[in-house]
Image: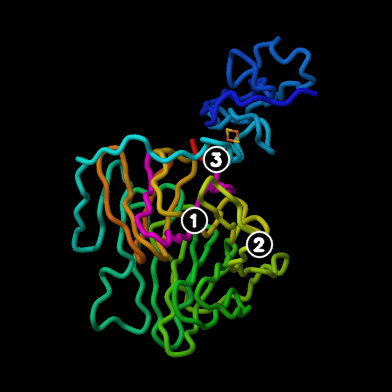
Amino acid sequence: MADAVVASRKPFYKELQAGRSYLWCACGRSKRQPFCDGRSHEGTGIDPVKYTAAVDREEVLFCGCKQTATPPFCDGAHSNLPGGYADEAEIVEDLPWAESDAAGVRVLDGHCYVIRADATRPADAPDWWCRTIVSTDMGAQHQAQFYAELTSGRSPVLASAAGDVVLWVVGGAGEVEISGRGFAIACDTGVYVRAGEAFRFTQSGTATLAVHIHACPATQMLDTLDTMPGNFDTAWPDRLASVDESQRHAMGPRYFQLLVDKRVGSTTATQFIGHIPQSRAEMHRHLYEEALVILSGDGVIWNDGARARVAAGDVIFFPRKHRHSLQCTATDGMNVVGLIHPGDNPGINY
Ligand code: FES
């Protein structure tokens, strides 16, 4: 069998018609990319792959590099081809810098913004303090995010009527109780709370327990319950995700590790931790909505119409299909934790 050849180092975005079948070119030789032209694969031993769209206007990314392990769709393998994850060639130095408002928000273009998570914490903040970072009011359609700090004691009982909740601990230690079951948590821990369950935090030690709370699908606010329900879903007993260098996936010069994902029961929301070396990726888009928490390092987020400086403690919100590039300017690189929804692979870009 012949090798597949690279037709394109990027996937092809297509909107499909329900019930219609598409023949994806697997050999890379078709003159009708990304589809089979009926003849170019002859003699290669590589057959095209048929896909029938389930819903109208289904949005897909057909693999162009023909190296995907999930044919006919892109799985991000193109980023690891030579030239597949290039630095941005065109630097537009006169783009305006987004200005911060009183809430610590710097709006770029098209609902993309940077927000300083703790910018509105009052000097006399109560033991439990929580603010909105991403919500439907702020333009999100697929996820919400709240930033919370607990200096001592226990938080209220919280839940999201919208569905799943994914947590990321950025400081301190303690316990999270999920619908009657307790889990010890510390800095750099991911946690999954299934739809219908509730959760609350207990702080321990001397440091403030600080947590990013993601809710998917999008919502405007978390619910506060009077009592903790006892409906922990025992079919999914493992809810914690931690950093494990052996689980890293390369993405060009970057790498990421999946944290909360389908392995702990989350089917549409995926949490990951990633590292960006000192570099600026070329402009790209995603089909999922994404919120990135900067854990360390600094850099610049670029859109088509504006740019903003980012540093540890900032959150960047990216709408679906928004063209952007995140530049790391720190010599030690930048570490981020992200939440994508809907999606299961943060390595896919177009
Ligand atoms: S284009 Fe082939 S894996 Fe993305």
Residue 76: x and y in percent read: 58, 41
Decide: is 111 above or below 150: above
Residue that appears at 71% across and 69% down: 234
Residue placed under numbered mark 1 in the picture = 339
Tell me the tag on residue 54: none
Residue 222: x and y in percent read: 43, 65
Q: Amino acid at mark 3?
A: Ser
Mark 2–mark 1 Cα distance, whole angstroms, equals 21 Å
Callout 2 secondary element: helix
- Which stretch appears magenta? 323-348
Residue 166: x and y in percent read: 53, 63
Residue 60: x and y in percent read: 56, 32
Chain-order first, disc 1 or disc 3: 3
Decide: is 89 above or below 258: above
Q: Quadrant of residue 75?
A: top right
Chain-order first, disc 2 or disc 1: 2
Q: Is residue 156 magenta?
A: no
Q: Quadrant of the N terminus?
A: top right
Residue placed under numbered mark 3 in the picture = 79
Residue placed under numbered mark 2 in the picture = 246
Q: Amino acid at mark 1?
A: Leu
